[in-house]
Image (cartoon, rainbow, N blue to C red):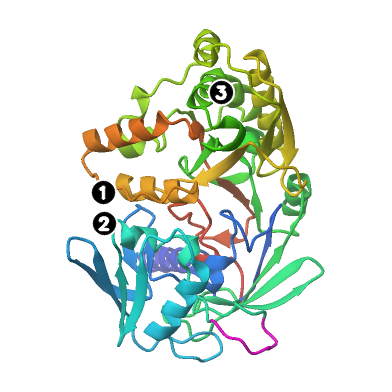
Amino acid sequence: MLRRFAISFLLVLVGTCAWGRTRPHYGGTLRVEVEGDPWNGTEGLTRRLVYDGLTKLGADGAVRPTLAVEWKAEDENHRWQFRLRPRVHFHDGTLLTSAAVVASLNVSCSTNCPWTAVHAVGSLVVFTSDSPMPNLPALLAGDAFLIALVRTEVGPTPSGAIGTGPFQLVAFNSGILTLAANDNYWQGRPFLDEIALTVHRSIREQWLDLSVGRADVVEVPSEVLREARQQQLTVVTSPPVSLLALEIPDSGALANPALRKAIALAVDRGSLFNVIFQKQGEITASLLPQALTGYSFLFPTDRDLNKSHEARGGLAAPALWLGVDGGGAMQLAAQRIALNLHEAGFNVQVTGTGSGQHADMMLRKLPIGGGDAAAQMEALLRGAGQSVPVTERAPAALFQAEREFLNLNTLVPLLDLPRAYAIGGRVRDLQLRADGTPDLAGISLEGTP
């Protein structure tokens, strides 16, 4: 009997210790480091900590309620109404109303919006459009449509930085953004007390700080993902969520479609994949990944210099400038593309953002989160400046619509790339969203009292 009692007591003790080690703890400061600007751009981390949208995409890509609890379409998708979640407040105590949502959307989207007009009707936010909007709930989950309190008076918090999210911006000093937990968050207070986010840290500096315990979450760009694993960093990786693409305007120096076709045929995707991005992600000539559409493999990805010369014929092209949105591997990729185009008879020079030099074409990354293929295709096209709604839903119809668009060669898909982050030993429960960004609000820290 004593032996059985001792064994039972030991099992209870072990189970209690294990539960104590794994259950989330409240408190602590999460230290995050990034290379760029965490507030602006498609890869910013802080906006979704401060703001909520009317909807969001779950980890599976499905549209989920956030500030809107329900929505419905009317008039064959020409009109949508979203009912707001009641008793939600902004960080300063202001009640969330439909008028506040409309004011925010009018500021964040003044042109090229998925809707023609948006109105506040009681607790409803009503969108109307001259064209059908079948993908509106998914589009509203994008960063461009997060809801901020619009105010004109001057206060201690930067204008436009008051949201309803799980954290509120409290300071930005010496390159560190400090975010404090929102105790009154409508979805429940986050586990962390604070997030201290250090900006403009190089990848090497980030990894060094992680190794000596000065950082908890750092970036792992696609091109060094293999190296991070070789160094045995604890890495959380997404599926392909970014499209590396070449944008070529159908005006200006490359208005002639034959020149754009020649450029598209001359780019060597294989060298970008193998050399620059170290075989991470997937080579593609399609807008969306194979896993999302099932037909990506139908678009040829091979370089064809002979066809490039044939497409160009005897057309003369002026000296061209290739802009690049980003540094590091993006700059190297742009240089490699410029070399490819030189072999096809084009004179191309690379210019970075902020140089003041007009770019005739642009190399950039576009977000391609999972979920409904039609909605993601429209979101991607709108991010590239196209405003035509994607109304087709059947794979065959989507393929035909995509092929017609790609034949214009105004957007040349190159690679599908993942996103990845390395974490320290005290980080628990880090999950990546559908767009590959980390859900920092869901993290807890091991050993925090």
C-alpha separation, residue under disc 1 versus residue under disc 2 = 6 Å
Front-lying residue, 29 or 102: 102
Is residue 120 a member of the stretch shown in magenta? no
Q: Extreme top residue here? A: 306
Residue 214 at what x, y percent from top left? 75, 59
Q: Residues within 10 Å of mark 3 (few under 14, many from 20)?
A: many
Q: Name the amino acid type tagged 3.
A: Ile
Is there a contact, CB below 8 Å, between mark 1 and mark 2?
Answer: yes
Circle 2 residue: 134
Residue 132, compared with residue 393, is above or below; it is below
| Identity of the residue drawn at 42% across and 66% down | 6
Q: Nearer the viewer, residue 385 or 149?
A: 385
Taking the spot 51% from the left edge, 36% from the top edge, the residue there is 250
Question: Magenta segment, which residues?
Answer: 150-157
In the rendered image, residue 155 lying in the magenta stretch gets the answer: yes
Q: Secondary structure at mark 2?
A: loop
Q: Which residue is mark 1?
A: 391
Whether residue 372 is visible: no
Tell me the crowding category of disc 1: few under 14, some 14 to 19, or many 20 or more residues within 10 angstroms, Cα based.
some
- Residue under pointer 3: 263
Q: Position of residue 262 (x, y in %)?
A: 53, 19
Looking at the picture, which amino acid does disc 2 mark? Pro
Distance from disc 3 to disc 2, alpha carbons, whole Å, reads 34 Å
Q: Is residue 439 left or right of residue 337?
A: left
Rendering coords of residue 11 (x, y %)? 41, 63
Left or right, 115 with reference to 416: left
User: Does residue 38 appear in this view?
Assistant: yes
